[in-house]
Image (cartoon, rainbow, N blue to C red):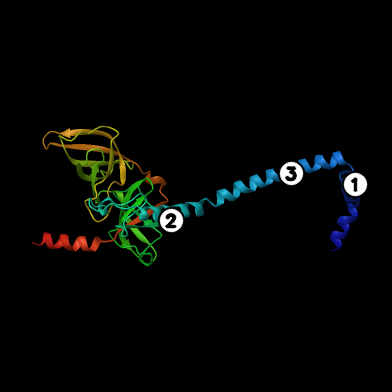
Amino acid sequence: MRNFIRFLLRYHLFFLFLFLETISFYLLVNYNHHHRQTFLNSSGRFAAGVLQISSTFSDYFSLKRANEELSRENAFLRSQLPSPEHFEADQPFGPGQAPATLNYLFRPARVINNSVNKHHNYLTINRGESHGIEAGMGVISARGLVGVVRHTSKGYATVISLLNTQLKISAKLRETDHFGSLEWDARSYQHVLLNEIPAHAPVAVGDAVVTSGYSSIFPENILIGTIEDFELNQGEGFYVIRVKLSIDFKNLTHVEVVEKIDREEINELEKLTEND
């Protein structure tokens, strides 16, 4: 307290000057029309500038929440899209109408761990058994195919990345529907190989490669990437196609877990056929 009094006594002239300046400014603005308008205009511009800066910072720090909301919205909208297999030739649907039963559910999730430099790369997502996630479910993003759920805990799950030499995906050329087997050769995190496309199939650089739909994991026509180059294996009569991935696995934050509603029924039926 004593130090504070000493401070006031030492700088009392400066504080008196500020006090008198404040009173003078107040009298000038309130009793002079021109100065009052100038002050109001200047203060308005200053306040607008401060609000703009504040809004910019607020938008930046809310990006995480906005991304999560967009991810949930994308998953919801995907769930509302009717699968082509629902439409039958003798069952007409009017504009905007969709079948009552949908084949796939999409659950949003966030990537909390990821690797791209190993032979067996995995991701970890912040959704698990308590969110309806099970092993064997597909994982995609807004840009394309990501991988397949491997293990789950109550609140988390690990995902076999497309950049894993143990994972093979049934894929096709979107233009012609010729399908083959997609796998990673562990050379580049930006590329995978599409094999078993027959030599008579028309192949061109830039053509899209998508999921075939010939499994109970992924819907048909999920983008994987585009053809960057290819060569014909003369001895086997099949192309070896190098595919540039549509996803940058080094910049992957939000994904969606895909559940095929009738997956168990399909798997049980196929097991019975295999055991015949």
Which residue position is annotated with label 3?
44
CA gap, disc 3 and disc 1: 20 Å
User: Dot 3, crowdedness within 10 Å: few (<14), some or many (≥20)?
Assistant: few
User: Which amino acid lies under the numbered mark 1 shown in the image of this protein?
Assistant: Leu
Which residue position is annotated with label 1?
27
**Chain-order first, disc 3 or disc 1:** 1
Residue 98 lies, in percent from the top left, at 33, 54
Asked whether residue 113 is in view, the answer is no
User: Dot 1, crowdedness within 10 Å: few (<14), some or many (≥20)?
Assistant: few
Image-based side of 150 in relation to 37, left or right = left
**Chain-order first, disc 3 or disc 2:** 3
User: Which amino acid lies under the numbered mark 3 shown in the image of this protein?
Assistant: Gly
Answer yes or no: do the residues labelled 3 and 2 have beta carbons within 8 Å?
no
Quadrant of the image occupied by residue 273:
bottom left
Asked whether residue 54 is in view, the answer is yes
Which residue position is annotated with label 2?
72
Question: Is residue 133 placed above or below 253 in the rendered structure?
Answer: below
Residue 195 lies, in percent from the top left, at 20, 41
Determine whether the residue tagged by mark 1 lies in a helix, strand or loop: helix
Residue 144 lies, in percent from the top left, at 34, 46
The quadrant in which the N terminus is found is bottom right
**Chain-order first, disc 1 or disc 2:** 1
User: Which amino acid lies under the numbered mark 2 shown in the image of this protein?
Assistant: Arg
> What is the number of the mark on residue 82?
none
